[in-house]
Image (tube, helix red, strand yellow):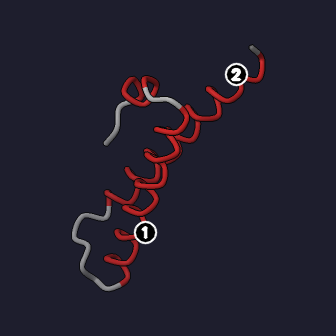
Amino acid sequence: MTNAAELRQKDEAGLKDEIKSLQKAHFGLRMQKATQQLGNTTLLKSTRRDIARAKTILAQKQAATVKA
């Protein structure tokens, strides 16, 4: 689980990389769930929220650079 403060310290390229890695992890969890190998299904919810958190911070950074 990523912390919002840690994400805010990253630049836009770092956030995009983080989003990609989280999406890959989420895909892997979805495949594990489909094949009945995932025991803890709450990981899906937490990775989904981490992706949303990273995308929100990325959008805020992009909006700040447009205004500046």
The 10 Å Cα crowd at callout 2, few under 14, some 14 to 19, many 20 or more, is few
Quadrant showing the N terminus: top left
Front residue (pair 48, 65): 65
Up the image or down, 26 lies above or below 51; here it is below
Which three-letter amino acid code belongs to the residue tagged 1?
Phe
Looking at the image, residue 61 sits to the left or right of residue 18; the answer is right
The residue most toward the bottom is: 35
The residue most toward the front is: 13
Which three-letter amino acid code belongs to the residue tagged 2?
Thr
Q: Residue drawn 46% across and 38% down?
A: 14
Q: Between tags 1 and 2, which lies in front? A: 2
Up the image or down, 60 lies above or below 22; here it is above
Separation of marks 1 and 2 at Cα, in angstroms: 31 Å
Looking at the image, residue 44 sits to the left or right of residue 14; the answer is left
Q: For residue 45, what is the image quadrant?
A: bottom left
Q: Give percent across and percent down for residue 64.
A: 68, 20
Q: What residue is pinned by disc 1?
A: 27
Q: Residue drawn 41% across and 54% down?
A: 22
Q: Give percent across and percent down for residue 35.
A: 32, 86
Looking at the image, residue 27 sits to the left or right of residue 55; the answer is left
Quadrant showing the C terminus: top right
